[in-house]
């Protein structure tokens, strides 16, 4: 009974989370308490798991990965207790440790291949809707719609428009697809996660091939339209890991044939857009890639400057600058928080070098555990988790995703599966 409840709640969490920002944070912003629904959901899931452990329904033993996360949570709480503003510190720190509470939940739930298949089928349908909505909003309704909806704005020439992060090159040139998320980068990373998961495990769980391909096509196009280069790189890295381990078992001539077909189709579509349709998408895409490769892109320059400044600040404050005073989340409380574009430095700002070592050691341990399972089973599907860890690790270089609650929940939901012994035994 408790296990079935957990599975239903997990499915609801996975399906509703992508809609949280646009529906809860924007449309229902007046109802403050409802914003914490996801934390309450995860809390209830953890309580149910603890009840199962106390009743003796399940045996539980902490792995090294979990011990590292527990150590980080304890350190996090200590920083909150000694903060000058405990409420603000707790509000921000919950983003770090609440998603971690899903580890024992996933580890102890009797998840089957059929459960994964049902969940992915629903997620694929939901993602297609999110992608279509994102394209419709960006290119038909335009940015004025999000302005009216309540997204972050700035005043330009006596008028309001979205913040620069919502446009290619900033400056209002062309809107990036945001979907139902808080920002285009978040949308891009969500799609990258889904694409890589589908590539790795669709055959294992028996997803409908046509349905999967349609989802991959629409998700891939929308991922490009987010103009999130970090998500592009992460997605390519994840897919690259898949092909690296499967190329020996793949018909190389067939792979080359389909690669050629996709490239030719892409060239034809881009040429038609540039010379005939003239949406401006191709021009923006080419300019973005060209500026990135030639080093003329202001965003890349900004990353380098941010890293240099962050190194200096970490050296000056090895124990952190105070949890809750840093990153985009701190903008809720402070006009001028300590900002950095790298999640690695952001964690150091929050809980110092020791806290960052604990936090990222857990990632390393999870990756090593995954490689150990792969060497034992030789099943390529196992490496889906390794790929997801590498993807997030790459994104942490240039974006403060460590303060993105939705992405972290998705991340821990995925990687915790490798610690579910029943699932590993039944699927592999």
Image (cartoon, rainbow, N blue to C red):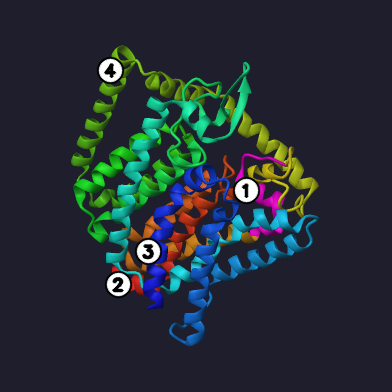
* Residue farthest top in this picture: 275
In this rendering, would 225 be left or right of 76?
A: left
* Alpha carbon distance from label 3 to label 4: 45 Å
Number of the front mark, 3 or 4: 4
* Alpha carbon distance from label 2 to label 4: 49 Å
**Residue nearer the viewer, 293 or 166:** 166
Which callout, 3 or 4, points at the residue further toward the start of the chain?
A: 4
Q: Quick check: 4 above or below 56? A: above
The picture places residue 134, in percent across and down from the top left corner, at: 40, 35
Which callout, 2 or 4, points at the residue further toward the start of the chain?
A: 4
Q: Quick check: 237 above or below 156? A: below
**Residue nearer the viewer, 264 or 284:** 284
Q: Which mark is residue 374?
A: 3
Q: Is residue 117 magenta?
A: no
Neighbour tally class for label 2: few under 14, some 14-19, many 20 plus, Cα within 10 Å: few
Element under label 3? helix
For the record, the magenta segment spans 338-357
Q: Which mark is residue 344?
A: 1
């Amino acid at each position: 009974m408790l296990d079935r409840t957990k599975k239903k709640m997990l499915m609801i969490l996975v399906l509703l989370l992508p809609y949280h920002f646009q529906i809860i944070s924007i449309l229902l912003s007046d109802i403050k308490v409802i914003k914490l629904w996801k934390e309450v959901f995860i809390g209830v899931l953890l309580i149910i798991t603890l009840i199962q452990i106390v009743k003796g329904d399940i045996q539980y033993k902490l792995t090294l990965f979990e011990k590292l996360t527990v150590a980080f949570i304890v350190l996090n709480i200590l920083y909150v207790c000694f903060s000058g503003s405990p409420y603000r510190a707790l509000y921000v720190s919950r983003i770090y440790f609440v998603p971690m509470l899903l580890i024992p939940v996933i580890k102890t739930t009797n998840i089957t291949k059929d459960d994964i298949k049902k969940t992915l089928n629903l997620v694929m349908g939901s993602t297609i809707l999110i992608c279509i909505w994102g394209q419709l909003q960006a290119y038909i309704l335009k940015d004025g719609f999000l302005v009216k909806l309540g997204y972050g704005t700035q005043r330009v020439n006596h008028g309001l428009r979205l913040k620069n992060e919502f446009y290619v090159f900033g400056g209002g040139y062309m809107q990036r697809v945001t979907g139902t998320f808080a920002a285009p980068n978040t949308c891009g990373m969500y799609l990258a996660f889904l694409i890589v998961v589908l590539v790795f495990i669709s055959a294992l769980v028996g997803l409908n091939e046509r349905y999967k391909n349609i989802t991959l096509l629409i998700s891939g196009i929308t991922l490009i339209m987010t103009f999130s280069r970090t998500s592009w790189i992460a997605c390519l890295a994840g897919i690259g890991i898949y092909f690296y381990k499967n190329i020996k078992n793949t018909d190389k001539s067939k792979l080359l044939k389909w690669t050629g077909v996709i490239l030719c189709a892409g060239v034809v579509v881009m040429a038609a857009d540039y010379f005939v349709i003239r949406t401006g998408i191709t021009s923006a895409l080419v300019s973005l890639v060209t500026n990135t490769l030639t080093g003329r892109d202001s965003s890349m320059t900004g990353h380098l400057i941010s890293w240099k400044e962050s190194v200096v600040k970490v050296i000056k404050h090895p124990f952190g600058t105070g949890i809750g005073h840093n990153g985009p989340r701190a903008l809720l409380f402070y006009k001028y928080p300590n900002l950095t574009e790298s999640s690695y430095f952001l964690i150091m700002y929050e809980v110092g070098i020791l806290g960052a070592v604990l936090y990222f050691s857990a990632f390393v341990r999870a990756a090593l555990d995954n490689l150990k399972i792969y060497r034992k089973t030789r099943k390529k599907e196992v490496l889906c988790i390794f790929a997801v860890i590498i993807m997030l690790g790459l994104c942490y270089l240039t974006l403060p995703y460590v303060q993105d609650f939705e992405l972290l929940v998705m991340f821990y939901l995925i990687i915790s599966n490798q610690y579910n012994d029943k699932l590993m035994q039944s699927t592999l």
